[in-house]
Amino acid sequence: MKRHVLLLGGCCIDEILECDHLPQSGEDILIKSKQVQLGGSCLNVATVLKRCGKEPVIYSALGNSVYSQYKNELQTEGFDCRCIYELQGQTGTCTILIDSTKERTFLTYNGIEGHFNEDNIPLEVIEETDWIYLSGIFLTYKDESQKIVPFLMRMIHQGKHVLFDLGSLVDQIEINLLRECVECSSIIKGNEHEIEILIERLKLSHITDLLSPELRIIIKTCGAQGSITYLDKNILSIPSIDVEPIDTTGSGDSFVGAFISSIMDNLSTKESLEIASRFGALATTHPGGRLKLKEK
């Protein structure tokens, strides 16, 4: 029986706008290109997992105006849509501004994709799941996000593992909810800025203060400088892969998807990080952040 990865992150509508520079307040600028697609961190992670032969299950509500279109697209691509369901309301959007340096600026509108009700997760999905991916952005929906922790606690007691991807809005997560999700995690991943925010918000002297028998791995990605991973008695430094970046959107998501897949294949942490680094670099050579399922 194939083992599944349950992805808690919600799908949103990505609007990707390329421009020469970001506008100052009151300034008008021309957009060089525009792309609109179903997106979100969990979909980027799921795409890499599927490319690597795993069985990702995306959990997300979709607004009634886009539900049929996007669910059909996902089913056509072969994704497991048992946990994608229709809800009255608007699906959130993420407007991504990409300037001439290829740096990204995100404007996020939270919609109904943050709705959480574990009754929408079939029992057979839970039974087949080994890993749970948790996006930090999924924890910014106030009352809805509070429902996630009891579910995660039950999953941990059933032997599931949680990778918590902090995300760019980690400073917007309610502090007690943030603490509880850290305590539920086997692995935490964040970029340099996100790790710094976590240290500040939890009042840590160093990120390694969080390491425990339960939380075994903390990954800090550092862009072109590669990644630093903290283990109980070791630190792994993995260099980046030299590529010509087009768009850095989704590179961290691709990194995470490849890392989870490699860990599920029983590769060592170092081997898993090296593979993840290659996938993260590959993602920067594509516009939009989501790798193609069948690309070489």
Image (cartoon, rainbow, N blue to C red):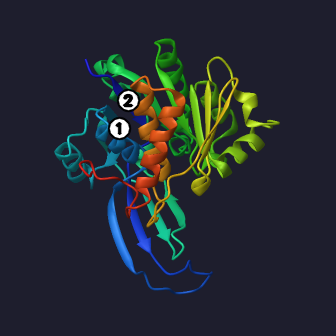
| Residue most extreme to the right | 205
Q: Nearest the camera: 267 or 186? A: 267
The local crowd at label 1, few if under 14, some if 14 to 19, many if 20 or more residues have their Cα within 10 Å, is many
Q: Report which residue position mark 1 lands on.
A: 49
Secondary structure found at label 1: helix
Mark nearer the N terminus (2 vs 1): 2
Asked whether disc 2 touches disc 1, contact meaning CB atoms under 8 Å apart, the reply is: yes
Where on the picture, by quarter, is residue 270? top right
Q: Is residue 183 left or right of residue 53?
A: right
> In x, y percent, where is residue 200?
77, 44
The label on residue 216 is: none
Indicate the amino acid at tag 2: Val
Report helix, strand or loop for mark 2: strand
Q: Where is residue 97 drawn, in percent x and y?
A: 49, 70
Label 2 Cα crowd, 10 Å radius (few <14 / some 14-19 / many 20+): many
Whether residue 145 is situated above or below residue 77 in the rendered picture: above
In the image, residue 6 sits, relative to residue 291, either above or below, namely above
Instruction: Give me the residue at 50% from left, 42% from top.
Output: 138
Position of the N terminus by quadrant: top left
